[in-house]
Amino acid sequence: MRKNFILKLLDRYRLKNSTIPIIVEGKNDVESLRRLSFSGEIITVNSGLPLVSLSERISENYREVIILTDFDRKGVELREHLGNYLNGSGCRMDTYLWENLKKKLPVKTVEELPYSIERVEGEL
């Protein structure tokens, strides 16, 4: 049940990513999502811009974004700060994927997702 849920969730978010960007921490996270067949726009937080400026730029261009920061303490804090800035600018943030991956997979970073998903697929 859990394994099927995760794979269906990823399929749903791959489709959603075709029109809504995903925000991740760095370029390795982008590569990990590409390995998982996410083909839409992926924005990195660690692009050199201050978080407030990045949030303003994102909210000027998008009405909604998918947040997928790491699942450790730093990633949680970053998700909260980013959410505050984006919500204040009128940009909706989707954290459903993040929340479910955090609960259902034994990972601390986005970089670990391809390996964890491969194990899930191998168990089916």
Image (spheres, rainbow, N blue to C red):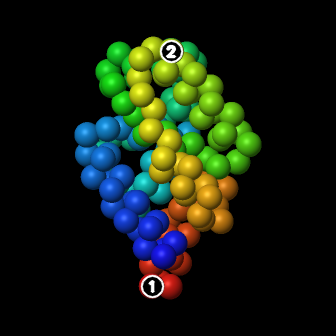
Location of residue 55 in the rendering, given as x and y in whole percent from the top left corner: 48, 20
Label number found at residue 3 = none
- In-front residue for pair 85/92: 92
* Distance CA(mark 2)–CA(mark 1): 42 Å
Q: Is residue 94 above or below residue 10?
A: above
Which residue matches tag 2? 88
Location of residue 101 in the rendering, given as x and y in whole percent from the top left corner: 55, 57
Between discs 2 and 1, the one toward the N terminus: 2
Which residue matches tag 1? 124
Location of residue 62 in the rendering, given as x and y in whole percent from the top left corner: 33, 25
Helix, strand or loop at label 1? It is loop
Which residue is farthest front?
A: 1
Location of residue 19 in the rendering, given as x and y in whole percent from the top left corner: 25, 40
Q: 99 left or right of 77? A: left
Q: Is residue 118 visible?
A: no
Residue drawn 55% across the image and 70% down it: 116
Q: Is residue 106 visible?
A: yes
Residue type at mark 2?
Answer: Gly
Q: Is residue 4 above or below residue 56?
A: below
The quarter holding residue 22 reads top left
The quarter holding residue 84 reads top right
Helix, strand or loop at label 2? It is helix
Crowd tier of the residue under label 1, counting other residues whose Cα lies within 10 Å: few below 14, some 14–19, many 20 or above:
few
Which residue is farthest right?
A: 73
Q: Is residue 115 above or below residue 72?
A: below
Crowd tier of the residue under label 2, counting other residues whose Cα lies within 10 Å: few below 14, some 14–19, many 20 or above:
few
Q: Could you tell me how many numbered marks the image carries?
A: 2
Residue type at mark 1?
Answer: Leu
Residue drawn 44% across the image and 68% down it: 5
